[in-house]
Image (cartoon, helix red, strand yellow):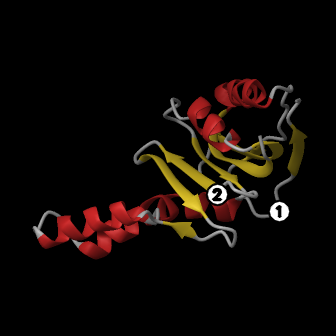
């Protein structure tokens, strides 16, 4: 299995869930995780943390699955592409749920042909606006909701962990 790198960005979490996030991430990575939690200025009473990791390809999906059930949590997980494996991006907000995208070597979101065709069909039949459908395919609603929390995290400490193999 190919090894890759990625980052888990926990944008908002109540203090009571901080140890649960560490436990879930540690369970996926196979090593104990202790994050440097800092107050999230964009959402009073919540905390934020970042975790850079190195593990086998597919770890981003496992991290997103382990964390997506907590409604008071906002997070993103990215995974760099490797030889023969595309990169991934997951975003989660309590209001929108999970967004998943495949990313290429330059970080661009790659939208599969069938999803574009489905968006065009929805627009042609009047079910949806094409621009809004394409923006949804690119994760724009998630970006709009998460942007204030990303900005508030500039300069935060980052910790590196490597998966035990």
Nearest the viewer among 114 and 17 is 114
Residue 6 is situated, as x and y percent measured from the top left of the image, at: 76, 51
Q: Quadrant of the N terminus?
A: top right
Residue 84, quarter of the rendered image: bottom right
Measured in 3D between alpha carbons, the distance from the residue under mark 2 to the one under mark 1, in whole angstroms, is 28 Å
Task: Work out whether residue 42 can be spotted.
Answer: no
151 over 9 or under it: above or below = below
Residue 74 is situated, as x and y percent measured from the top left of the image, at: 57, 45
Secondary structure beneath disc 1?
loop
Nearest the viewer among 46 and 89 is 89
Q: Closer to us: mark 2 or mark 1?
A: 2
Q: Residues within 10 Å of mark 1 (few under 14, many from 20)?
A: few
Q: Residue at x 34, y 61 (%)?
A: 114
**105 sits left or right of 32 in the view:** left
**79 sits left or right of 31 in the view:** left
Residue marked by disc 2: 86
In primary-sequence order, the first of circles 2 and 1 is 2
93 over 123 or under it: above or below = above
Q: Residue at x 67, y 42 (%)?
A: 58
Q: Are marks 2 and 1 in contact (CB under 8 Å)?
A: no
Residue marked by disc 1: 155
**165 sits left or right of 17 in the view:** right
87 over 95 or under it: above or below = below
């Amino acid at each position: 299995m190919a090894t890759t790198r990625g980052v888990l960005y926990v944008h908002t979490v109540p203090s009571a869930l901080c140890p649960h996030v560490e436990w879930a991430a540690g369970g996926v990575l196979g090593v104990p995780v202790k994050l440097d939690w800092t107050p999230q200025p964009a959402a009073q009473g919540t905390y934020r943390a970042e975790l850079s990791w190195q593990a086998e390809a597919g770890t981003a999906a496992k991290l997103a699955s382990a964390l997506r059930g907590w409604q008071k949590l906002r997070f993103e997980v990215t995974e760099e592409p490797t030889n023969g494996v595309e990169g991934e991006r997951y975003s989660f907000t309590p209001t929108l749920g999970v967004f998943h995208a495949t990313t290429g070597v330059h970080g661009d979101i790659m939208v599969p042909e069938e999803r574009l065709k489905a968006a065009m069909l929805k627009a042609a039949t009047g079910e949806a606006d094409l621009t809004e459908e394409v923006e949804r395919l690119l994760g724009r609603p998630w970006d709009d909701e998460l942007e204030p929390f990303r900005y508030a995290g500039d300069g935060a400490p980052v910790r590196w962990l490597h998966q035990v193999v």
